[in-house]
Amino acid sequence: MTLLMIGTTELVLIGGLILLLFGGKKLPEMMHGMGKGVKSFKEGLNEPTDAERQAWQQQQQMQQQQMPQQPAEQQPQQQPQQQPPTQQHDNGQ
């Protein structure tokens, strides 16, 4: 199981081989393309699929149908405000 343990020397050797094979100009372009691919993959994981979008829309429609429909001009009835009692004075007459 010593194959899985890669040391610093092996990593430097692999990096040098890659640099020799692809060259100094092509390597940054490849890494840029790889970065774009990873970014696109992560966005794809977070983006809902068509089936999820359709299920969400159906759920929203069902919720709207279940809510009672109130016309826009009808406002909730307010209770009449009670006015404070007025004091009446008896003049004795």
Image (cartoon, helix red, strand yellow):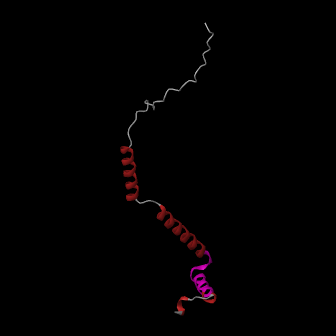
Q: In the rendering, at what x and y percent does residue 64 appear?
A: 39, 44
Asked if residue 54 lies left or right of residue 40, the reply is left
**Looking at the magenta stretch, what is its main secondary structure?**
helix
Rendered view: 93 above or below 28: above
Q: Is residue 6 magenta?
A: no
Q: Residue at x 37, y 55 (%)?
A: 55
Instruction: Please identify the quarter of the rendering in which residue 68 is found.
Output: top left
Of 2 and 58, nearer the camera is 58
Rendered view: 29 above or below 51: below
Query: Farthest residue toward the bottom?
Result: 2
Q: In the rendering, at what x and y percent does residue 63 appear?
A: 39, 47
Q: In the rendering, at what x and y percent does residue 90 appear?
A: 61, 12
* Residue range of the region highlighted in magenta in the rendering: 11-25
Q: Residue at x 61, y 75 (%)?
A: 25
Q: Residue at x 56, y 24 (%)?
A: 83
Instruction: Please identify the quarter of the rendering in which residue 71 is found.
Output: top left
Q: In the rendering, at what x and y percent does residue 60 appear?
A: 40, 49
